[in-house]
Image (spheres, rainbow, N blue to C red):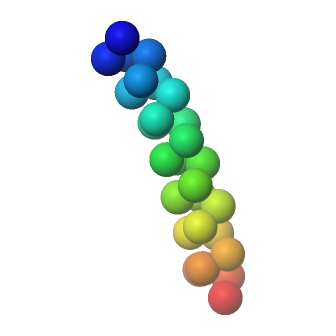
Amino acid sequence: MSVLLEGRYLPSLHERIKHFHRPRRKR
C-alpha cells in the first residue's frame, strides 16, 4: 500500500511542481 500511495503522490507532486515552476520562471 506504501508503493501505491507514493506512486500516486509522486506524479501529483511532480505535475504540480512542474506547472508551478513553468509559470513562475516565465514570469
Left or right of 20 in this view: 10: left
- Given residues 15 and 9, the one toward you in this image is 9
Q: Residue furthest left?
A: 2
Where is residue 26? Give x, y as percent.
67, 82
The C terminus lies in quadrant? bottom right
Where is residue 14? Give x, y as percent.
52, 47
- Given residues 2 and 22, the one toward you in this image is 2
Residue sitting at x 49%, y 47%: 13
Residue sitting at x 36%, y 11%: 1
With respect to residue 24, does 6 lie above or below?
above
- Given residues 9 and 18, the one toward you in this image is 9
Left or right of 23 in this view: 7: left
Residue sitting at x 52%, y 58%: 17
With respect to residue 4, does 17 lie above or below?
below
Where is residue 18? Give x, y as percent.
58, 57
With respect to residue 20, does 27 lie above or below?
below
Where is residue 3? Give x, y as percent.
37, 16
